[in-house]
Amino acid sequence: MSQQPSAAPAPTSAVATVSERHDWWRDAVIYQVYPRSFADSNGDGMGDLEGVRTRLPYLRDLGVDAVWLSPFYASPQADAGYDVADYRAVDPMFGTLLDADALIRDAHALGLRIIVDLVPNHSSDQYDWFKRALAEGPGSPLRDRYHFRPGKGKNGELPPNDWESIFGGPAWTRVTEPDGTPGEWYLHLFAPEQPDFNWEHPAVGDEFRSILRFWLDMGVDGFRIDVAHGMVKAEGLPDLGSHEQLKLLGNDVMPFFDQDGVHAIYRQWRRILDEYSGERIFVAEAWTPTVERTANYVRPDELHQAFNFQYLGTHWDAEELRTVIDRTLDAMRPVGAPATWVLSNHDVTRHATRFANPAGLGTQIRLAGDRELGLRRARAATLLMLALPGSAYVYQGEELGLPDVVDLPDEVRQDPAYFRGAGQDGFRDGCRVPIPWTREGSSYGFGDGGSWLPQPAGWGELSVEAQTGEPGSTLELYREALAVRRATADLGAGDAVEWLRAPEGVVAFRRGDFVCVANTTGESVALPAYGRVLLASGEITETSGEAKVPADTTVWWTRA
């Protein structure tokens, strides 16, 4: 039974206290909150919505425009809330719908927008439809809302096709029927506790259109769509014909990912969103083979933004960066959508640790690397990202320069992929360790009752308290960068950069009177001083119209 707030705000007034800035999403800086690791209000070791609400002034002062909340719905937590049992209820570990309502209202009063996660590719196996489908047995109409199939082999003992789970192993699980016999198989592209919906069934579309309206009526400003490239499967669920399918992801259109049929769903959803005031938005988590295919998701009558995973995976290398920036802007320009830029999130190793290691190790790394080098590059990469045209995403704690916690004991890990040996590396816990707010305390200010993942010694010196007001700290760099970005007319929205001639290993571009230079090499370089320095990620020196830019440093100039 879904919890109901005492008085949900009307759709037309839901964002009345948020500034009505036209096309705000085209240059927005959006901060990702992973609720279980942000702030704990009740001392149970788990972050919650009330904890987020109490820290909203911090996010306002940081200078972000919107807050994206990872899932807080009712869930058995088989995959950290991405297995949803009730899309209209808050899981008790995070609070209640009243807490969600209060959070949305407070955010709007502070000028912040709220974006919530939507998980439409799959439900929890504890979702009412799926439980009834199992209980009613073969022939149940509820089974048509998922992908139930008879198995292959003499006695149906083999999976219906050769698809593999993203978390490792077959993408199919065989059920035990009500009479105790082995029966049909169901599809789950992720964990077995996450059965995939059959989006060919009209009831599925009806349900999610209703879910959208529920949260829009609550006042949310948009949705981040999980596995936006999933949902629709190729007709007949054909075999892929290869093993180690994870290695193929992102390189080709798969029969279960990036099928063209998803776009009809998004055109329907966009019509619903456009009925509401306040410029609500959709953001796609769409892993596609190319940025050009990503652009299909953000055509004018579909979604507003899509994550730029090609940029996230780019090495700290000037040539690679220029290439992906050009390709991104070129792909988004014809569809009129803003580019997005992101360096970290809840599924990948924090970029302060990725950049501390040699290139080519991927986006899940269990090596600490050179901490000093990683932080220097991370700071420089942040200024480069925030100078690019479009919208930027910041993952909680990156403004503190947090590294991944790479030495978590195996017995405390909770990433489901870690327990499925043939799947992902399963080291996502390292970027999900609760963030530090204070120098001291049982969990460095996260809460009074410890934290659900152990925090490392020394975490307090990276805390908000330790870095606030500290000249040169990473937190103050972020605060200043976001303030300068908001105050500088040539930054934010746009669809192009003017590349400047620069030494090998240096990225340099102009946007109006603004110039950004990023030295990705391991040596200092001498460059023209392009005007007045606005901000730099490291110490630079200027003499006689020339600037000496240290290794792994980004500088912002203005001619105005």
Image (spheres, rainbow, N blue to C red):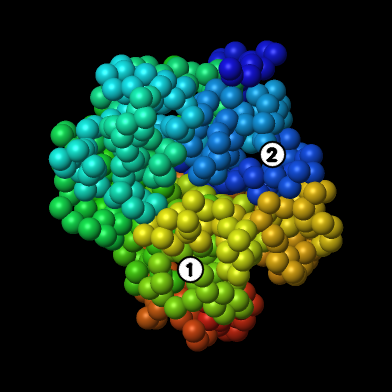
Separation of residues labelled 2 and 1 (CA atoms): 28 Å
Estimate the x, y position of residue 321 in percent, counting from the top left. 38, 66
Kind of residue sitting beneath label 2: Asp
- Check residue 143 in the rendering and tell me which mark sits there, or answer none: none
Q: Residues within 10 Å of mark 1 (few under 14, many from 20)?
A: many
Kind of residue sitting beneath label 1: Ile
The residue wearing badge 1 is 365
**Residue 203 lies in what quarter of the image?**
top left
Estimate the x, y position of residue 319 in percent, counting from the top left. 34, 72
- Residue 202 is left or right of residue 220, and the answer is left
Labels 2 and 1 touching (C-beta < 8 A):
no
Q: Residues within 10 Å of mark 2 (few under 14, many from 20)?
A: many
- Residue 218 is left or right of residue 297, and the answer is right
Relative to residue 507, is residue 19 depicted above or below?
above
Nearest the viewer among 257 and 505 is 257
**Residue 158 lies in what quarter of the image?**
top left
Number of numbered discs on residues: 2
